[in-house]
Amino acid sequence: MTVGWAPADLGLARGRPDSRGLAEALRTAIRDGRLPAGSRVPSTRALAQELGVARGTVTRAYDQLITEGFLLSRQGAPTTVAERLAEPDPVDAPPSPAPPAARWDFRPGRPDLSAFPRRDWLAASRRALRNIPADDLDYGDPQGHPLLREALADYLARVRAVATAPERIIVCNGYTQALSLLSKALHDQGVSSIDFEDPSAPQLRTIPASLGMAVRGVPVDDDGIDVEQVRSGAVVVTPAHQFPLGVALSSARRMALVQRAKAEDLLVVEDDYDGEFRFDRQPVGSLQGMAPNHVAYAGTASKTLAPALRLAWLALPPQLVEPVRALKINSGLHAPLFEQLAMAELIRSGAYDQHVRRSRAAYRKRLELLGTALDDLRANHRPHPAGISAGLHITLQLDPEGPTEREVLTRAREHSVELEVLGPHWVRAGARPPGVVVGYAAPAEHAFRPALQALVAVLQR
Ligand SMILES: Cc1ncc(COP(=O)(O)O)c(C=O)c1O
């Protein structure tokens, strides 16, 4: 042989390889430098003999590698390892390992994922898949499948007093995309500034900000957003359960906001992220129902089912349907069809309502347990819960004399507890009372009590 390597160097046992295995062994040896650039490879005859395989096997492997550019073959010259592939690609430094996940998850905005209704979802998926006509597997309506939009229009009217129709609904990949499309549509229409409640979710404010829109913070008190201080052409609100403070928009403020929207052509974006979860009374209906032509309603499956579904829905004023639909086309057309149809079937069959009812009962119980644990703590001074009895999270105001947000986060890390603090949620500088945002829905049901103990240990003075 005219080369300095033996088949065993490539991990090839005599008589073993087919052409695909041989090509892969040579490819790997070239990539990792065992076969250096410019080195000659054996003749097909010699290598076939050496390996005890048919010559055609080696020829096919060489041809494959020549086509891929690993080997160079010239008329009258021996076949060699190609130059540019001889050096292995520099391997990027491996990313530093992610910090280990905390044992007890109290991050807000997450439902109990262990309670995802797998059996119902499977049954709904199976039924949907069985019934779907082949034609529906083509590119579909960018607004979402009519079956889901019909189911949503009915559900939202029934449960959230939303006044809409399937034609006004756009199914999105989460509220995150819904807000992104809405912001872009408004920006395209010349709206250069958008108001958010202060505090609010920081990751949502970056969406219009990334388009170059100015983001203003409007103060929130016990009655919700201070409507008189809204200044922009659009305002994003969480009227059913303010995120993160947990208050509800009072009826006087609801009226005032709707009146301003109608009188001043102000667009209200209603983020109804956890509107199904009110524990002390029937949920207050949506704001959208009071002014369907001025309020863009948004709901999501992220809190009722799971964020991984990436399913949310907009019920839009008529003038926004076409612009948002056009933007939805540009951002990947419609949401994945099977998820849409399973969701439609889940709603249609009543399994969704049932799941929401079950979840509501479970979260109410958790909030009670949390309240009792906090009462014990409060005898020992604070922290103080804010807001109504609703949703998947509670904000605890910290005693200014007590531990700071940073200290709470440090203690949380020590106890392997994950939670958030209020700090990053504020928009304006100035009065930024400290607090902790606790998502009590996130721990799995069986782990809730030990998780609560860990949380109490963090908050204990
Ligand atoms: C205030 C608020 N609204 C809506 C959402 C839902 O977003 P998505 O539907 O993209 O999961 C979240 C998620 O954390 C949120 O915090």
Image (spheres, grey):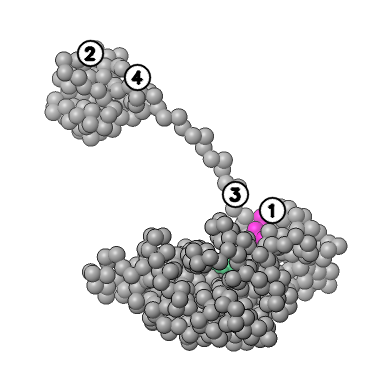
Circle 4 SS class: loop
- Image mark for residue 181: none
**Residue to which mark 2 is pinned:** 1
Going by the numbered disc 4, the residue's amino acid type is Pro
The numbered mark at residue 100 is 3
Is label 3 or label 4 in front?
4
Q: Position of residue 244 (x, y in %)?
A: 66, 69
Crowd class of label 2 (few under 14; some 14 to 19; many from 20; radius 10 Å): few
Label 4 neighbour load within 10 Å: few <14, some 14-19, many 20+: some
Residue carrying label 1: 413
Q: Secondary structure at mark 3?
A: loop
In the shown orientation, is residue 4 left or right of residue 62? right
The one nearer the camera, 192 or 69, is: 192
Q: Residue 358 location in percent, x, y?
A: 52, 79
The N terminus, quarter of image = top left
Labels 2 & 1 near each other (Cβ < 8 A): no
Whether residues under marks 4 and 1 lie with C-beta atoms below 8 angstroms apart, the answer is: no
Q: CA distance from mark 4 to mark 1?
A: 50 Å
- Amino acid type, label 3: Pro
Q: Is label 1's Cβ within 8 Å of ligand 1?
A: no
Asked if the beta carbon under badge 4 is closer than 8 A to the nearest atom of ligand 1, the reply is no
- As drawn, is 11 to the left or to the right of 311? left
What distance separates the C-alpha of mark 3 from that of mark 2? 53 Å
Please state the extent of the stretch shown in magenta in the rendering. 415-420
Regarding mark 2 in the picture, which secondary structure is present there?
loop
Question: Would you say 343 lies left or right of 3 here?
Answer: right
* Image quarter of residue 415: bottom right
